[in-house]
Amino acid sequence: MAIELKYIVGNVSDLSAAVAFWRDTVGLKLKFQTPEWAEFDTGTTRLALQPASPSNPAGTWQPGLRVPDLAAKRAELQARGVNIGRPPHEEHGFLLSLFTGPDGAPVSLSGPAPKA
């Protein structure tokens, strides 16, 4: 099954300051920004930023993977002993879930939402 790295999500203590750094200092093109999320146009893999939280401390990063069949990939991971967490939820037209990687690192796993 094909797996794409779609996002790298940075957890930041100050979203506005982090956006300014990546946009104005580094020179990335800001795609959009909300109070809870910022995304840069960086090709097929996006750099995204979100405010830090107790479960996502500032300075940590999370990969976001996308697969064509989320249910099948979750079942495969679970069969291999991976903690796949809660059932997926729909967000922005995709089903989104998390699994736990090495050292307890969260990994986002998404796939297409069922068509209505």
Image (spheres, helix red, strand yellow):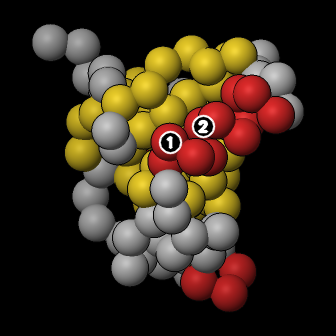
Q: Is residue 67 at all visible to an observer of this figure?
A: no
Residue 79 image offset from top left, x and y in percent: 53, 71
Q: Please, is residue 87 above or below residue 92 in the view?
A: below
According to the picture, the residue beneath numbered tag 2 turns out to be 19
- Please identify the residue farthest to the left as the structure is shown: 116
Kindly identify the residue that appears in the image at 50 percent across and 56 percent down.
14
Quarter of the figure with residue 114: top left
Q: Nearer the viewer, residue 33 or 68?
A: 33
For the N terminus, the image quarter is top right
Expressed as whole percent of the image width and height from the top left, the position of residue 86 reads: 28, 66
Identified at 31% across, 21% down, the residue is: 93
Image position of 74 with respect to 55: above or below: above
How many numbered marks are there?
2
| Residue lying at 49% horizontally and 48% vertically, measured from the top left | 15
Above-or-below relation of 79 to 4: below
Camera-nearest residue between 30 and 108: 30
Q: Give the residue pinned by disc 1.
A: 16
